[in-house]
Image: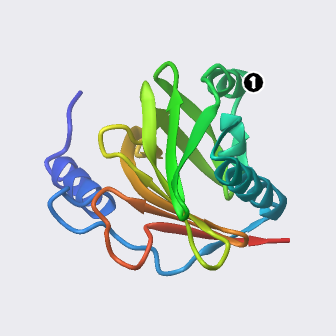
Amino acid sequence: MTFRRQTLPRLALILAILFPPAAGPAQAETTCKDVPGIKPEIARFLGEVSAAQAAGQGTLPLNHVFFGFTYATPDDLKALEQRVTVELKKQDAAGGDYLNKGAEITVEGEFAADPTWVRMPLEVRGRYAFDADGGLTLTYNPAHTVELGERHLGMFFFKTIRQSIVKPDYVAFYLDDNAGPDPDRCYNAVN
């Protein structure tokens, strides 16, 4: 394959803009996207985690964590369903630990009308904590985190999820090393 001299520098510039080097700060999202119809799924998820917390432990189906996600094929949903349920264990009054195990998978689908890929390792681990507004913060263990993927110029790029915030009408994702106040992706649940 022959490239014109200008092609490689342009490609490098596009990739640098879309995916800044890991050493730099993550790009924060300034405008949240509206997603209709996911409030009931969010309410179910928050209710299941609250019930497990009240009981001291519990489980929930993994696909209940994927609220608002439409699967590209039945095989994508099947791959997700073949992983065990998410285990929740209370650690203190504010929250606890979560764990999900299974085969390494990449699931293709759509969220908020955007093509999305989710890559899951053998184990997904982290902590959950409730806030005063009835929301939940999920902080992933860096060695056992989920990755979100996008396709750009025919190539796949994945970024790790550091933290997710789920409120009755809002979902936010903080990717890679973003420890700032603004999420990389955020969504408003609207009806």
Q: Nearer the viewer, residue 72 or 147?
A: 147
- State the quadrant of the N terminus: top left
> Residue shown at 43%/59% (left/top)?
163
> Residue shown at 38%/58% (left/top)?
175
**Residue 80, image quadrant:** top right
Q: Nearer the viewer, residue 1 or 16?
A: 16
Q: Is residue 67 found left or right of 125 in the rendered image?
A: right
Q: Nearer the viewer, residue 133 or 25?
A: 133
Q: Is residue 91 found left or right of 11 in the rendered image?
A: right
> Residue shown at 65%/19% (left/top)?
82
> Residue shown at 69%/34% (left/top)?
72
Secondary structure found at label 1: helix
Relative to residue 107, is residue 138 depicted above or below? below
Q: How many marks?
A: 1
Which residue is tagged 1? 74
Residue 120 placed where, x, y %? Answer: 47, 33
- Residue type of the residue flagged with mark 1: Pro
Q: Is residue 117 found left or right of 69 in the rendered image?
A: left
Q: Few, some or many C-alpha atoms within 10 Å of disc 1 (few <14, some 14-19, many ≥20)?
A: few
Q: Is residue 151 found left or right of 19 in the rendered image?
A: right
Q: What is the basis of the colouring in this image? A: rainbow
Relative to residue 158, is residue 103 depicted above or below? above
**Residue 109, image quadrant:** top right
Residue 64 placed where, x, y %? Answer: 72, 43
**Residue 86, image quadrant:** top right
Residue 40 placed where, x, y %? Answer: 84, 59
Relative to residue 56, is residue 175 depicted above or below? below
- State the quadrant of the C terminus: bottom right
Relative to residue 150, is residue 190 depicted above or below? below
Q: Nearer the viewer, residue 99 or 96?
A: 96
Q: Can see residue 78?
A: yes
Q: Can see residue 146?
A: no
